[in-house]
Amino acid sequence: MAGFEGLIFSGLNHLLDGEPWAQERLRPLAGAQALIESGPLSLHLRIDEYGRFVAGDKGFSPDVIVTLPADAPIKFLLDREGLLSSVKLSGSVDLAEALAFVFRNLSWDVEADLAGVIGDIPARRLSTFGGKLGVQLQAGANRLAENLVEYSTEDSDLLVPNRDVEAFGKEVNILRDDLARLEKRVSRLQ
């Protein structure tokens, strides 16, 4: 697990190195610790004096706890806004706000990193191709999800279609109203 955490810290700090504003935003919070939880995974991190992330001390209680949904990796790829809206924060308001702002606005300049390895022109072409491929993969994943929902509701007995649930609800309301009228009639007869 330590190797995995090292990769996460390296990746996050690489992104921070490319965005000086983010380090400036985090620098005043040096020493603050956060715990990021997502399903069975948890990551303790601390902000150092340079506004970068280092491994946090598990012996200390975190200043803020960031709880991500268990499906965070999938939401990160398919629906980043949905992921950000499903994050739960607790603890220090200042730290939580700073982390939320940094993670919401932090972006990876893939093209610049590729240019350092393979050159400017191939990096540009590869980046453009990757962007188009990403859009196509996301559209394909959305179509697959729609098809699975349609199959589950229309062609199998896995889920009940919304129209059937709505019709059932209307019938229950009619039955409730009829029962109320019947109760009034019975009470008048007594």
Image (spheres, rainbow, N blue to C red):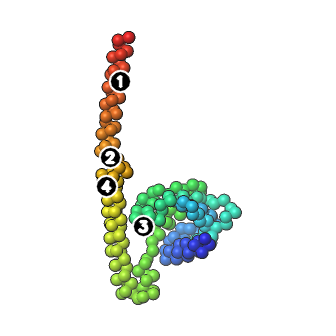
Q: Quadrant of residue 31?
A: bottom right
Residue 69 x %, y %: 50, 58
Nearer the camera: disc 3 or disc 1: 1
Asked if one can make out residue 9 in the rendered structure from this viewpoint, the answer is no
Q: What amino acid is at disc 4?
A: Glu
Indicate the secondary structure of the residue bearing disc 2.
helix
Q: Residue at x 37, y 15 (%)?
A: 187
Q: Residue at x 32, y 59 (%)?
A: 147
Point out the tag, 1 or 4, that comes first from the N-terminus: 4
Residue extending farthest top:
190
Report how far apart the C-alphas of labels 3 and 4 lie in the structure: 23 Å
Quadrant location of the N terminus in the rendered image: bottom right
Check disc 2 and give the amino acid type.
Asn
Q: Which residue is mark 2?
A: 162
The label shown at residue 27 is none
Query: Hey, what amino acid is under mark 1?
Result: Ala
Q: Earlier in the sequence, mark 2 or mark 4?
A: 4
Local crowd at mark 2 within 10 Å, few (<14), some, or many (≥20)?
few
Answer yes or no: do the residues labelled 2 and 1 have beta carbons within 8 Å?
no
Q: Which residue is mark 4?
A: 150
Between the residue at mark 2 and the residue at mark 3, the CA separation in whole angstroms equals 28 Å
Q: Which residue is mark 3?
A: 77
